[in-house]
Amino acid sequence: SNQSLANVVVNPLPVLTLTDSEVCSGSGIQLSAAPAGGTWSGGYVSSTGTFNASGLAAGIYPVQYSFSDQNGCSATGNSNIRVFSDQIIPLLTASAAICEGEDAHFQLSGIPGALITYSINGSQPVQLILNAAGTAEVIVTGASIDQQLLISQVESGPCIKAIVVQATVPVKLKQEVR
């Protein structure tokens, strides 16, 4: 009987490490994966991993990464790029004029979960997060002078904008009776 022996080497497939990413529409992001040296594919991504979100609507955009090792073994992985809208400037409205000692009310509306930095009458800036409906209310109790709310920054996901949005609630002073 004729027999032949052969050694067969089975090489493992490459193990890929990819992470999902976030980007603000109108900008771009460099994607990364391990091991390096593979090729990216999918909509809005270059083969080297530059994802261009210019003109994209908010949403999830899938991409793929393929890698072949020195043994000719290949693996492909998937990742999602979450694009956030860059149209994040909130609306701000103020209550009508109030009398001295009454409460001043400000309503904010915008993207749910947005982080808003604001100040009242030039005070130290504070932050609030818009609720699931994209709204919030700021109340200044017992106002004795006009109340001005100034929004200086808004942040939603990776999108951060320095802005100036302001509204004022006029306070009518009580007249002294003699």
Image (tube, rainbow, N blue to C red):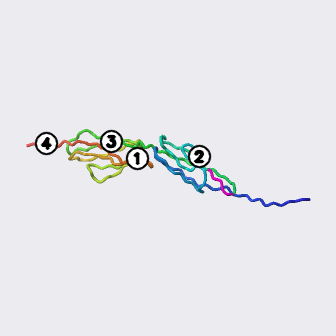
Read off the magenta span. 66-70
Q: What is the spatial separation of the Cα atoms under label 3 and label 1, in whole angstroms?
A: 14 Å
Badge 1 element: loop
Q: Nearer the viewer, mark 1 or mark 4?
A: 1
User: Which residue is denoted by mark 2 in the rendering?
Assistant: 41
> Of circles 4 and 3, which is in front?
3
| Image quadrant containing the N terminus | bottom right
Relative vertical location of residue 91 with respect to residue 120 in this rendering, above or below: above
Mark carried by residue 42: none
Write down the residue under mark 1.
114
Please identify, in this view, whether the residue under mark 2 or under mark 4 is nearer the observer: 2
For label 1, the crowd category at 10 Å Cα-Cα, with few meaning under 14, some 14 to 19 and many 20 or more, is many
- Tell me which amino acid carries mark 3: Leu
Residue 69 painted magenta: yes
Q: Relative to residue 26, is residue 172 drawn left or right?
A: left
Tell me which residue sits at (50%, 50%) in the image. 29
